[in-house]
Amino acid sequence: ESTAVVIVGAGPAGLTLGNLLLRAGVECVVLERRGRAYVEERQRAGVLDHAGAQIFEEWGLADGVLAGVPGDGGLEIRVDGEPRFLDFAELSGGRTGRLIPQQMLVRRLIGSFEEGGGDLRFDAAEVALHGLDGDAPWVSYRDAEGVVREIGCVYVAGCDGHHGVSRASVPAGALTTYSHDHGIGWLTVLADVPPPRRPLMAVASEGFAAHFPRGPMASRFYLQCAPEDGVGDWGEERIWAQLRARLGDSGLPAGRITEMAVVEMRSFVVDPMRFGRLFLVGDAAHIVTPMGGKGMNLAIGDADVLARALRAAVREGDGEGLAAYSAVCLRRVWNYQEFSRWLTEMTHDAGDVRVAGEFRRQLARARLDRLFSSGVAARAFADLVAGG
Ligand code: APR
C-alpha cells in the first residue's frame, strides 16, 4: 500500500498534522505505537496559546476542537504570599490563549480526524523508517494482529516524541543537537483539587511552586525540588505542607493525588529538523521545560508549518516550503527556549537563596518587580505568552 505522508506518532504533533493534511487534501496514514485508551488518557500540558488557537481557527477546526474551552485570562505571580496579577487579555490586546487539558485536545483531534475519514492506526509495533535519503521512502510496522505491513510514501513526518524511532533513524552526524540541563528539580503532582481561579506561580524562600487548572475538578501542581530528588523523597504530607507554605495558602485542601512524577528540567534542540524525506515535528525535534507552557504549542506550530509546506509540495509541486521548514520552525523554537529559560531563572533565583546566591536573588526580584511596574515589560511578557 502507499500514501503521500506517513505520520509516526499520535500525540499533539501527529494528530494536529493529520487533521491539517486531511483539510489540505493530502493523503496520510498515522501510525501510533500505543493503544487508543493510553493516548486518550495521557495527561500533560494544559494551555493552548493564542498562536496555537489561531492555527485551529485558520484551518476551520476551532468549532470542533475548541468548543466550550475557557480562555486563559491571566497569571497570578505570588511573591512571598503577596498576590500580583498580569491580565493577558489587556496586556496583549485580546490575544489570549485557551485552558485546555491535553487529553481533551487529543480526544477531540482524534474524533475530528476519524470523522473526516482519516486513517489512524493504533498499536503499531516495531515502526521502522526506510530509504529516507532516497526519493521513495517506506515505513514498516507490525499491526495489532501481528502482521508486518509496509507503506510506501513520499514523505515521513516524525511526530513520535523525544524517545521515538524517527530521530533515531537519522545517521549519526547528520543532525547537530543542543541540550541544556537547567540544574533544578521539579516534582509534578496531579490531584483532585478544585482549580485556582487563574493560573498561579509562587515565589517563596522555600522555593518555587505553581498551581494550574486541569479542567473543572483537577489541578496540576509543580514544586521545585533538589535536582537529585526522586518521587520517593516526597511523601504526601510534605507535598501539601510545602505547597501551602510556598503558595501562601494555609487553606489549600489536600485532594487525592492521581499522578506524581519528577520532571526533567532539560532543554533539547536538533538542527536541522529534517533529514532527506523525514521531517521532525514537536518533541521529536525539541524539548522545552514545562515553564512557560510552550511544549505543546511548539508541536502544533511545527505541524502548521509542515502541513502548509506539504500541501504546496504534494499538490502544486512547490518544494520551497519544505526547504524552509526547519529554519522557520527553529526560529520559534529558540525564541520559546529563551522565554522558558528566562522565566525559569527569574522565578527560581528569586526564591530559595541556596539556588543562586543572594546577589542573583536580588537581580531576579528586580526582574519580577519590573513586570509589575513597567507596562512595556509586562506587555513584552504577555506577547511571548500569546506566542507567534
Ligand atoms: N512508533 C509509533 N509511535 C510512537 C513511537 C514509535 N516508535 N514512539 C513514540 N510514539 C508515539 C507515542 O506513543 C506518542 O503518542 O508518538 C507520540 C508522541 O507524542 P508526544 O510525546 O506527546 O510528542 P508531541 O506530539 O511532539 O507533543 C509534544 O505535547 O505533551 C505535550 O508538552 C508536551 O512538549 C510536549 C508536546
Image (cartoon, grey):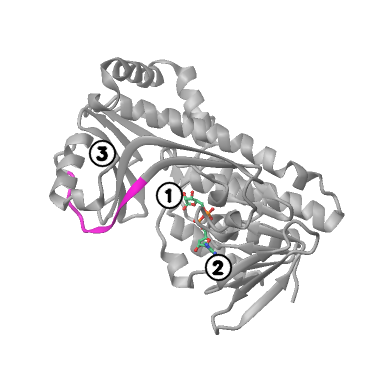
**Residue at the spot of label 1:** 46
| Mark 1 touches mark 3? (CB < 8 Å) | no
Residue flagged by tag 3: what amino acid is it?
Ala
Cβ of disc 2 within 8 Å of ligand 1?
Answer: yes
Could you say which disc has been placed on residue 226 in the image?
3
Cβ of disc 3 within 8 Å of ligand 1?
Answer: no
Q: In this view, does 309 lie to the left or right of 232?
A: right
**Cα–Cα gap, marks 2 and 1:** 22 Å
Residue lying at 62% horizontally and 49% vertically, measured from the top left = 172
**What crowding class fits label 2: few (fewer than 14 Cα within 10 Å), some (14-19), or many (20 or more)?**
many
Q: Does the magenta stretch include residue 159?
A: no
Q: Is residue 207 above or below residue 257?
A: above
Residue flagged by tag 2: what amino acid is it?
Glu
Q: Is residue 33 above or below residue 376?
A: below
Callout 2 secondary element: loop
Q: Residue 66's x, y, as percent?
A: 53, 54
Could you say which disc has been placed on residue 230 in the image?
none
**Cα–Cα gap, marks 1 and 3:** 25 Å
Q: Is residue 100 above or below residue 8?
A: above
Q: Which of marks 1 and 3 is nearer the N terminus?
A: 1
Q: Is residue 257 magenta?
A: yes
- In the rendered image, the quadrant that contains the C terminus is top right
Q: Residue 238's x, y, as percent?
A: 15, 46
**Residue at the spot of label 2:** 32
User: Which range of residues does the magenta coloring cover?
Assistant: 252-263
